[in-house]
Image: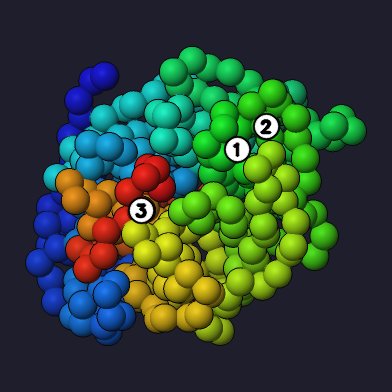
Amino acid sequence: MTKVLVIVVAAALCSVAAAQTAMPGEREVTVTAIPGVVAAGSRWQAIWADYATADGINGSSDGGVLFAQEQTDSIKKLLADGTQYTYLENVYGIGSVSLDSSGRLFGVERTCTEPLNPELPGCDVLTRVVQLTPQRRLLANSFPDGRTLGRLNDLIADGRGGAYFTSRGAYHVSAAGVVTTVEDQNLRSNGIMLSGDGRTLYVTNVTEVLAFDVARDGSTSGRRVFGTLNGDDGGDGMAIDAEDRLYVTGNAGVHVLDAEGRYLGLIPTPRRPITVAFSGADKRTLFVPQIGAIGADGGVFQLPEGMRTIGMTIYTMRMQTPGFARRPK
């Protein structure tokens, strides 16, 4: 792998880390204590920014993170000091990644559903769920009835060679490539996550988190509302900590629910977060990619009118609790 230092808006990022007030495009935030989770007055530090996305983030065993960058068809690796590597190339429209405890890396490839990909007109490459390492293997690119998977959102490895994924609804694909439905009715899914013991599947549904029981064969049942975002919406990526608390990104920040679904509090963020993971040497650092970046002129990065601005910034915060230890996320 080639080592690359991210120098985009580097000077601005140093200012973000030291500043007491919001930088252009940010909102001012004050972190209040959530006992056992985060201390009052904790501060976000911006360690990375780019004019492309950072989605579907996942911790790695060396204390770094992996994330998908759809527009460059690559998976990036970021260390806590801001050093970036290109971890994997030629992953077509990669939208999210998930590592399992055996070291297998899975991803959703959105192919030409990304509006910025030049191949979009006339492109017939189906979106797909794939195992990427240690060897590349297609898991699925269609439902059993022949329908395409659509624009895929997120996934979580099931620990058995398959994965759960979202695309309008929530689904499971086994190691053998069999796709089954978790739920596809009255659901606007986005993020998806498993409890520490793997027996509960969580799926975001705009203002709430749904839960499903997971059987030994990976099948699911028992849809229920696990918890809410306390009036916020935009539920997206999730992570769990060592106490099986659930961290859910929403418009206002990162919401924290306990293992029973009780709402514990909000960790407000400078920008809208879309994904979250624990990592760092002791797994006590929260990595949260957030929408927006500072441009070369020191102002808000914005593409010309009519073009979709996709710049993002990754922020970190030290936590009182470590993340879940027995799998990467």
Label at residue 324: 3
Mark 1 vs mark 3, foreground winner is: 3
- Alpha carbon separation for disc pair 1 and 3: 18 Å
Q: Nearer the viewer, residue 70 or 133?
A: 133
Q: Residue at x 19, y 51 (%)?
A: 282
- Alpha carbon separation for disc pair 3 and 2: 24 Å
Image quadrant where one finds the N terminus? top left
Label 1: which residue? 163
Badge 1 element: strand
The picture quadrant where one finds residue 231 is bottom right
Count the marks: 3
Q: Amino acid at mark 3?
A: Phe
* 52 left or right, relative to 216: left
Q: Residue at x 65, y 51 (%)?
A: 214
Q: Amino acid at mark 2?
A: Ser
Badge 2 element: loop
Q: Position of residue 23 (x, y in %)?
A: 23, 69
Q: Position of residue 236 (x, y in %)?
A: 53, 60
319 versus 27 height, above or below? above
Q: Are marks 2 and 1 in contact (CB under 8 Å)?
A: no
Label at residue 22: none
Label 2: which residue? 174
